[in-house]
Image (cartoon, rainbow, N blue to C red):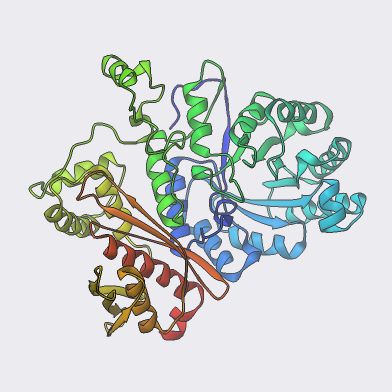
Amino acid sequence: MSSTVNGEKVYLFDSTLRDGEQTPGARLSYEEKLEVARQLARLGVDIIEAGFPVSSPGEKRAVQNIAREVKGPVICGLARAVKGDIDAAWEAVREAERPRLHVFLGASDIHMQHKLKKDPQLLLEQGVEAVKYASRFTSDIEYSPEDATRAREEYLYELLEAVIKAGATTINIPDTVGYAVPEEFGAMIKRLKENVPGMDKVILSVHCHDDLGLAVANSLEAVKNGARQIECNINGIGERAGNAALEEIAVALRIRQNYFSYYTDINFGEIYRTSRLVSKLTSISVPVNKAIVGLNAFSHSSGIHQDGILKNKETYEIIDAELIGGKAAQMCLTARSGRAAVMNQLNKLNFSLTDEQLEKIYGYFVELADKKKEVYPEDLEALVLDHLSFTEPRYKLDYLQTISGSTSVPAAIIRLKKDDDSISEEVAVGAGPIDAAYNAINKITGLSIGLDNYRLNAVTQGRDALGEVKVEMSYQDRTITGRGTSTDIIEASVKAYLDGLNKLLKLNGYWEKSN
């Protein structure tokens, strides 16, 4: 929960599962969305925007499942200002403990003239009617005038007054294209508070994009000027350059309590784990220099800095890694470490595993520890995220052998085990051993899958480091990312390819057809 309460509460509205999932390649499965939602509840967010139910039957089912199973936060569904969208959103969230409908419609001249092609007054009336229609289902209604920071303010005043009278209880001001700058945005929020009748009776919210790198700064400036809800995403993922990063906002309000007289109900110890979970499931890496959760956020290379840190951490650190459940007070594990030591380290990493899950991870730990002299916390974290799958894969790697050399033709033998326990094996050649392995997998599946991007990173340092591979794959109209880890980079590459393949099979319906 929050630290000592200081001033007014700021509500954190998490849109990772809606706006964040619009990041190219970040598609989550039904089970993965539920797991992220459960973790967001543990993190202590106030509202979870679970999705855009009308967009697809699968999206609607995922939101319904979250509404039924995730307790604590408000569960919100997004809808355009049309009855069909609102019906779908309500059907998806109606079983939540506290459901919310979020209605949006363009408000800038650019959107009204070029996208919606309707008269502003007609659009105002459409927004009002949409809110009135939504109020038949719930009293918790949020309204967003899309592209508000490029809209005419006089029009916004009239529009927002009308939708508040119609029943909106939260008014959200989206900086849809990341156009605003802090002083300007803060002044706009203040004017809305002063000039819109009824604004004092609703929650004023902001939704900022990071196209100019100002999403967090704009959000905090808005709070100073009267906003009490911030819409944000884990790791700042989202459309284009992303959205305001939840972890940066929460920690800024906590660390600078002497400046911001506000608090959140975030469970800070779950921040690091949430960041890693979202990064793993979306296959979107956290930049090493990312504030709060980046690998280098608590690293020091300068001799002067290191000397200062050894004498007093406060010389160069304003945030304690333990605050966010990060990498602090950690020990290295070896093949001689028992289950208790592994569980202790997992607890420090904020993983809560069942006995069955612990036994599974311990088995993988022993295998890794036999290959490495020391297993670092980052290695253990990668094992958990890699092996605690949220869906049973269609294909698993059963055997791998590759041949390569300066004078030989690269080749690979791949044996895959299907979920019906059948075995398939193929041999293929390629430009290199990894390419050959991917060709062999394609021969087994009979699919021609394109590899658009390949990234290899070391989880830790040293010659025996655990390698993490992320691939971006495409098939027909689908693009997905896969992830795999191993001390053998070819094996990690194959695991990543299979991870993406299994996701593509499920998304494209082959899973159901072949079962």
Q: Residue at x 30, y 73 (%)?
A: 396
In this picture, is 287 found above or below 493? above
Q: Residue at x 67, y 38 (%)?
A: 206
Q: Would you identify the image quadrant in which residue 82 lies? A: bottom right
Q: Position of residue 444 (x, y in %)?
A: 35, 83
> What is the residue that sits farthest to the left in this orientation?
336
Q: How many marks?
A: 0
Q: Which quadrant would the C terminus be assigned to in this image?
A: bottom left
Residue closer to the observer: 56 or 214: 214
Q: Residue at x 58, y 31 (%)?
A: 10
Residue 344 shown left or right of residue 419 in the figure: left
Relative to residue 292, is residue 387 depicted above or below? below
One can see residue 334 in this view: yes
Residue 298 pos. (x, y %): 36, 30
Rendered position, 451 above or below 201: below
Could you tell me which quadrant the N terminus lies in? Answer: top left
- Residue 66: x, y in percent? 50, 57
* In the image: residue 328, left or right of residue 455: left
Q: Is residue 306 above or below residue 415?
A: above
Q: Is residue 228 visible?
A: no
Report x, y in % for residue 272: 39, 40
